[in-house]
Amino acid sequence: MPIEEIEIQIPYNYREYEWEVPIVKAFNRGLELWMNLHRRAGKDLFCFCRCLLPAALKRPGTYHFIWPTLKQGRDSFWEGKDEEGRDILSNYIPQKLIVKKDNQDMKLIVSAVGGTSTIQIFGTNNGQYEALRGKPGNGAVFSEYAYQDPRGYDVVAPMLRKTRGWAVFNSTPNGSNHFKVGYYNAVSNPRCYAVTKTITDTYDHEGRPLISPVEIEEERKRGKSDDYIQQEYYCSFVQGVEGTYLGRQLQEMRNEGRMGNYTYDEHALVNTAWDLGVADFMAIIFYQVLGNRIHIIDYYEASGYGFAHYARVLKEKGYLYGIHTAPHDILVREMGGSTERAFSRLQKAEEVGIRFEVLPLSTFANDVENARAVMNRVYMNEATCGTLIAHLEQWGRVFSEAAGCYSDVERHDIHSHAGAAFRYMATAVTENVYRPVEDYHQRSMDGEYLVRHCSKYNGFG
């Protein structure tokens, strides 16, 4: 049935709180929303009922509800319930407007004025954002954006610009990462509406706080730290990220002015530390050892490329290189394409002129200790290492719900690769994995020879 023939009040079975009214008005004026809201403020239901669904009903198109992971989108929304135990999809969407429901792809087709609209759940982490590539988009809600891979927005943004679509970002802070940067950019952008609401600002329809001081005290009694409480309930960006390996040391680095204009010193060699990652993901730190100081001057990461690509990156950077270090697993042999012989990644790298020093076998705990030990010697070039800094601020441990605290297990996510490259760099410095100066010269000459004569491998002209 066409929506024009259906009389239904939108929003359906939902009424925003009084403190949310200015946010609704800002969205209706066409402003991009950046919502920094405390945990359990109801931001996801608000974004669906007051932004996503009304927009989809008014204008036929494609609308994305984007989460850190698909599983989170399914658990929290698609199969989620509200605080009264009611199914979100059943209670907040008029069933007469649903044309089709695809449970596998978490996709709804709903009636719209003049046609139909598609609303679909997506994730961004672990490369899930690639599912958004090439899809049309008229509007998108990024839920818990501080915990997402920001490359998801990079994929969606061109289509939103093409369709003159809209974007809404909601989250609780997660340290000084891309959400913090986006939020503070929005504060000074007249095309955006940035709002922060802590537990002192939010209340229900009867005027009662959504989160009471008594509940905060209960959190403290359960062992939650002040860092956690400040971040989750008082929306603090400046607290150290609980459970990270280097969060506090990075803050000290900022306070001491060791993040700034530390660029390439042409009188010193540039060393690199690599994490080979999985699925061909590479993270490369470029650094110079200047006396007792370690200057990190550059950072590069990419996935899906062979060593020829990275050889080209090294050449285009224009640095005079010392050593390239890689973890011990570079020695693992892999099948060499159509050949029957298995090659190690070390051999594949040497074919295109990258000669690695293999780090000695070491435990993760030892590498992390090395990383912490060298932090007071590290200086970073902020202009070229912003991505590295953001990763290191988030590189951390798995939270154990059962124990109510962070475990000793590393959290494997988009930040792990940069964290690995940094601890490998620290181990290389600590273990003094270097060659005599005259050998650097020979290695440089070897590399130049390969660049000139091995184009069938490396693609150099």
Image: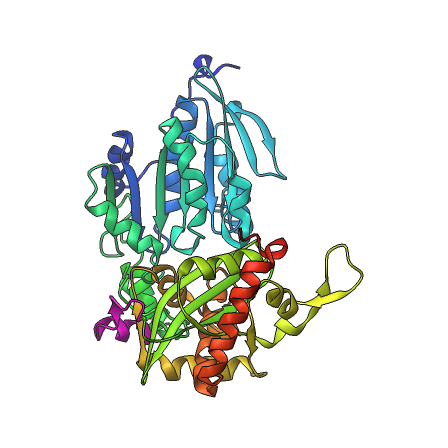
Residue 116 in sight in this render: yes
Q: Is residue 43 above or below residue 373?
A: above
Q: Which residues are magenta?
A: 249-265
Residue at the spot x=23%, y=56% of the render? 200
Residue at the spot x=37%, y=32% of the render? 161
Residue at the spot x=71%, y=65% of the render? 334
Residue at the spot x=28%, y=30% of the render? 28
Residue 139 in sight in this render: no
Q: Is residue 153 above or below residue 158?
A: below
Percent coordinates x, y for residue 295 in the rendering: 33, 74
Residue farthest toward the top in the current orientation of the protein = 5
Residue 381 horizontal side relative to residue 117, left or right = left
Camera-nearest residue between 297 and 82: 297
Verify whether residue 212 appears in magenta: no
Q: Is residue 448 above or below residue 134?
A: below
Percent coordinates x, y for residue 315 in the rendering: 46, 60
Q: Quadrant for residue 362, please give it.
A: bottom right
